[in-house]
Image (tube, grey):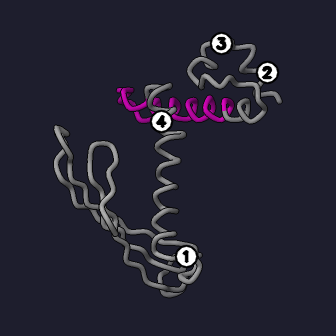
Amino acid sequence: MSWEKHHWRLERRRIARVATTPEASGLCGCWQLVKVRRERQPVGSNPMKPSDEVQYYAASLHYDETTDDELLAILRGHWSAIENGTHHRRDVTFGEDGCRVANRKAAHVLAALRNLANGIYELEAARGKAGADGCASWLRGQTEADALALLRR
């Protein structure tokens, strides 16, 4: 795999995979085991240190269903959707990473409320009733009565 430039760094991903069965792996629905090595090198004045990481995956796709490049694209797309979708919204809009609640039960309640708000926003966006300007501005326009009415639908 060749080096690619992203976010002020060079990245290279290499994949190794082996076909298996759910019985042999002990994992329900697992048809291949995958190892991805990700190397990163900073470019320019990027203060990031070089890194070399290995990640392991269990895949429900049969070995013959995808090529190495296709599987790498699937894995990358999955994480990209998480980082650019829900996680970004939870961190930027709801400030989840900056929340310093130490009580475990309170943290679970806050996470559940964030999930609820995120789900309601997704439903309203799918219905075309949430503006294109994003979740933060949509949330600012909501009242308790609006939220309760949305939950009753």
**Residue 66: mark:** 1
Q: Residue at (20%, 46%) from the top-left corner?
A: 43
Please tell me whether residue 105 belongs to the stretch shown in magenta.
yes
Q: Position of residue 151 (x, y in %)?
A: 76, 28
CA distance separating discs 1 and 2:
45 Å
Q: Amino acid at mark 4?
A: His
C-alpha gap between disc 4 and disc 1: 29 Å
Residue drawn at (53%, 47%) of the image: 81
Apparent side of residue 112 relative to residue 97 in the rendered image (left or right): right
Question: Which numbered mark, 3 or 2, is in the foreground of this view?
Answer: 3
Magenta span of residues: 96-121
- Measure how far apart labels 4 and 3 are at the Cα level: 20 Å
Q: Which residue is mark 2?
A: 149
- Which quadrant would the C terminus be assigned to in this image? top right
Q: Amino acid at mark 1?
A: Thr
Separation of disc 1 and disc 3 at Cα?
45 Å
Q: Earlier in the sequence, mark 1 or mark 2?
A: 1
Identify the image quadrant of residue 29.
bottom right
Q: Nearer the viewer, residue 76 or 111?
A: 76
- Mark closer to the chain start, 4 or 3: 4
Marks 1, 2: nearer the viewer: 1
The N terminus appears in which quarter of the rendering?
Answer: bottom left
Residue at image point 25% right, 55% down:
40
Counting residues from the N terminus, which is met first, the one under dot 2 or under dot 4?
4
- Please name whichever residue, 51 or 59, is drawn nearer the observer in this view of the structure: 51
